[in-house]
Image (cartoon, helix red, strand yellow):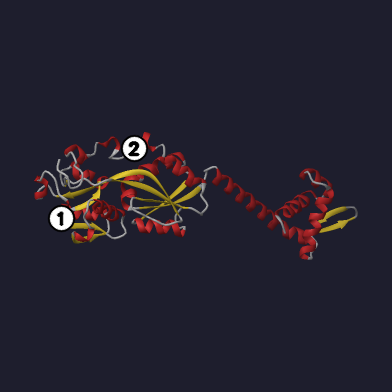
Amino acid sequence: MTLEQLRIFVAVAERQHVTETARALNLTQSAVSNALAALEERHAIRLFDRVGRGIVLNENGRTFLGEARAVIVRAALAEAVLADLGSLRRGRLGIFASQTIAGYWLPARLVRFHEAHPAIELDVHVGNTQEVAQAVLDGACEIGFVEGEAEHPLLEQTDIGEDHLIILTLPSHPWTRQDVVQVDDLAEASWIMREAGSGTRSSLKAALAAAGCDLSRLQVKMTLPSNEAVLSAVQAGDGVAALSEHVARAALAGGLVVALRFDLPVRPFRTLRHRDRYRTRAAEAFVASLNTDAADPRTGSVLDGRASAHQQAWELPSAGKQR
């Protein structure tokens, strides 16, 4: 049984006339008759009584007519859904983002996209970089956002922004009175760290390795699962931590913490997408919208213009070098 056969059956049942139905549907009389015959023969049942040269819907046909109409309506609704999805009049977009991006970089961009496409449901989840990468690989989301390394042959990565990692401590810490913090000094501090698998931790590890210091040399007194927990712990004690400037911006501006005079390189924000999975129109539109966000003041990064809070306070030297 096909939708075309159902469509012809309903049209004949409504008109009780093959010739008129053929004319209305722009079909030949034989095409209409063959469709009805195929439907009846497949299920070994008569839907019409042939009376003289005419055709009359029988009891079987009347019982089946309501179901046939319902199927045609559902098919029309399904076609409308596909049309809406293709034109962004409806849809759902699954996004998984690392904590720094989800908490500070992504929200304004989500609002901007929602204003342009209010019928698209945005389903956003948060995890560390490893969890985001796995979600993309598993198909749990269509787009991932990370700031750490996520190497996998099935992941397509594209730079869409940048971030600056800074080392924070209390204003009373003795290091704040030094002209510069040396690499070897870092091993003497009490560190508060993000968990393994986070982009913040992996970025710090890579930056320190480039400066000649292995992460294992650091004295880690506490490992916490969120940026906000790390920042709160720094403010409550005498430890040091590496966090995104996005995360620390308010605390820096309020003088609750200071950025030490040790420069860490800029790190990219990246989208992760599965190379082989189907890409919806909603996802393509959202990624395209990221390219226009630089002109919107609501989505500006704290790094735009290179005038961040700690860069105004310090002229940051390269790692391990005197100013």
Give the label on residue 298, or none: 2
Tell me the element at label 2. helix
Tell me the element at label 1. loop
Number of numbered tags placed on the structure image:
2
**Disc 2 packing (10 Å; few <14; some 14–19; many ≥20):** few
- Type of the residue with mark 2: Arg
Spot the residue most to the bottom. Answer: 44
Place of residue 135 in the rendered image (x, y in percent of width and height, measured from the top left): 42, 58
Mark 2 and mark 1: span between their CA atoms? 33 Å
Spot the residue most to the right. Answer: 52
Q: Tell me whether the residue at label 2 lies in contact with that at label 1, contact meaning CB atoms closer than 8 angstroms.
A: no
Which residue is pictured at 13% across the width and 45% down the height? 180
Residue in the foreground of this view, choosing between 254 and 206 = 206
Residue in the foreground of this view, choosing between 290 and 19 = 290
Give the quadrant of residue 297.
Answer: top left
Place of residue 247 in the rendered image (x, y in percent of width and height, measured from the top left): 26, 47
Quadrant location of the C terminus in the rendered image: top left
Place of residue 76 in the rendered image (x, y in percent of width and height, measured from the top left): 64, 49
Q: Is residue 161 left or right of residue 45?
A: left
Which residue position holds label 1? 239
- Type of the residue with mark 1: Gly
Place of residue 28 in the rendered image (x, y in percent of width and height, measured from the top left): 82, 47
Q: Is residue 49 left or right of residue 202?
A: right
**Dot 2 or dot 1, earlier in sequence:** 1
Position of 60 relative to 97 (above/below):
below
Residue in the foreground of this view, choosing between 282 and 264 = 264
